[in-house]
Image: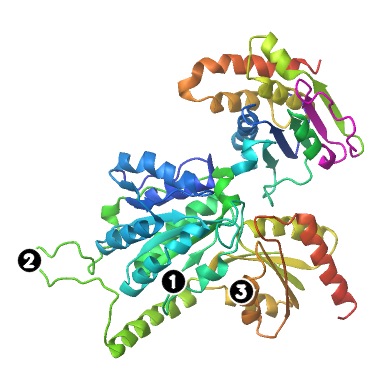
Amino acid sequence: MAEEFNHELLCVLSGFGGQGLLFAGKVLANTGLIDGRHVSWMPSYGPEMRGGTANCSVSLSDDAIGSPFITRPTALIAMNQPSVEKFAASVQAGGTIVIDTTLAMDGAAGVQLADDVKVIAFKATEMAEAAGLKGLANIICLGRLWAETHFCTREVLDAALAKCVPAKKQHLLEPNRKALQMGIDLAQ
Amino acid sequence: MADNTQAQERVLMKGNEVLAEAAMRAGCRFFFGYPITPQTELAAYMAKKLPLIGGTFLQAESEIAAINMVYGAAAAGARVMTSSSSPGVSLKGEGVSYMAGADVPGVIVNVERGGPGLGGIQPSQSDYFQATRALGHGDFYMPVLAPSTVQEMADLIYLAFDLADEYRTPAMILADGMIGQMMEPVTLPPERDPKTLPAKPWATSGHKGERAHNVVNSLYLSPEKLEQTNFERFERYAEIKEKHQRQELMFCDDAEIVVVAFGAASRIARTAVRDARAKGIKVGLLRPITLWPFPTKAIDQVIANGAKRFLSVELNMGQMVEDVRLAANGRAEVSFYGRTGGVLPTPEEVLVQIEKLAEDMERGE
């Protein structure tokens, strides 16, 4: 594959509890593990999880990672409006924001963004449900982010996804794969 | 159980779970604890896995009960541990003091949260004083190890068990909610069969009619006898101070400003120091790995290398800064920056502090 390799991805994934952002973050983190890169996955925990935003910060880097809490992300996946409001303005110049506008209906409107930040907004949850992939909007968003930023090769991405679906839930692997492909296809 | 299982490939695990897994691999077969955020994954992992390898997991009725169970198992010669977070660790203070007084080894994990009181549940380093100045009454210390990565969670709890056994002392892992909750790749240490660990001839494990009774006790009613036991214990402390200071130095060879930070704060400081270097500031990072003994030799070394200012960065109102000041002993200026209550400074905030110090030095202040 001829994609340009991304040397550092600092990604915040944020939404309501139950939308699967921590899981999507684990898939992202596992790509770095497979690639032998430096990786950190830092979740929000405690009462923060029980309302507002459940989020995690995932850093993939070729250097040792400093703070695992990302204050200036290069990428953001936001699946509700509070997440857009909390994180969109902090995305670095040239960064990428993926917004699921099923719940975050206003998208990034009204947020002061850094220069050249690319906003990709689409109704991921609606799409997932229409395709019989209820609960997999997270993976659609991850696929779309990958198509934009190529944080790893496609082979590694597929392997990381397969690794994260637990042995007891193997029946969910195929739907997850479909959701990932759906997100990637959106870029075309 | 296989003895010299080779180190495994990298796996992605949470810091708290790694503490549990590495403790079992170090030969720990007894865990007594009580749940508290942000440490609970450790106990949950032990509950699931320890019985599978013939160990005992017990959720005690309180932290006080748990530490006394640790005392009992340790007296019988077991590798044993407990874990908690700040308010729960306070409750263990009496038991830890008894363990120190009775010279029994054991590992205590504190995954710190904000205080005082019940405080909050976000990461903090507010228990530095409590950990390094004796966790409990009496004249004692214990080795305190401060991991800053998930890999170090594994490496240092392994070391903590060995130090505890070698010097017959409780030993502490002082972590925080950040390192406990985060996932990073880790290479787990090899598994050790508890039967292959060095013998503990002092343990109350049954004399079988072949030797005199062993007694494990911390009560000495004769002041002279008690003083002698304390003298003997402090000889061991002197040896620990001499042999076991540990730290990591980054960019310290030509550093005029040295940031001192451990655990979570060192992660943030690392980014700030890197950014300051990129701006041409001669700054380094000294990261204590042992908080007790404090790495005084490393402080001497960076001063010899030309350090003129220290900046202690902590997740509290300024605790380790006192040890930095004692170690520098007037040879360099020492200042402090920290956030407290579970609030974390950003690398940018720390960078501003470094830049201010650099400007002051340029103006000759």
Q: In which quarter of the image is residue A111?
A: top right
Q: Position of residue B241 (x, y in %)?
A: 48, 76
Chain letter for the residue marked with disc 2 in the picture: B
Name the one closer to the observer, B97 or B307: B97
Mark 3 residue type: Ala
Distance between the alpha carbons at the discs numbered 2 and 3: 50 Å
User: Quick check: B307 above or below B109?
Assistant: below
Q: Residue B298 carries which label?
A: 3
Provide the residue designation for mark 2.
Answer: B209
* Secondary element at tag 2: loop
Query: What is the number of the mark on residue B136?
Result: 1
Q: Residue shown at 15%/62% (left/top)?
A: B206
Q: Earlier in the sequence, mark 1 or mark 3?
A: 1
Which amino acid lies under the numbered mark 1 shown in the image of this protein? Gly
* Residue B202 vertical placement versus A49 (above, below): below
| Chain to which the residue tagged by mark 3 belongs | B
Mark 2 belongs to which amino acid? Gly
Magenta residues span A87-114
Label 1 CA crowd tier, 10 Å (few <14, some 14–19, many 20+): many
Crowdedness of circle 2 by 10 Å Cα count: few (<14), some, many (20+)? Answer: few
Chain letter of disc 1?
Answer: B
Residue that lies at the very extreme toward the right in this rendered image: A115
User: Do circles 1 and 3 both sit on a common chain?
Assistant: yes
Q: Which mark is residue B77?
A: none
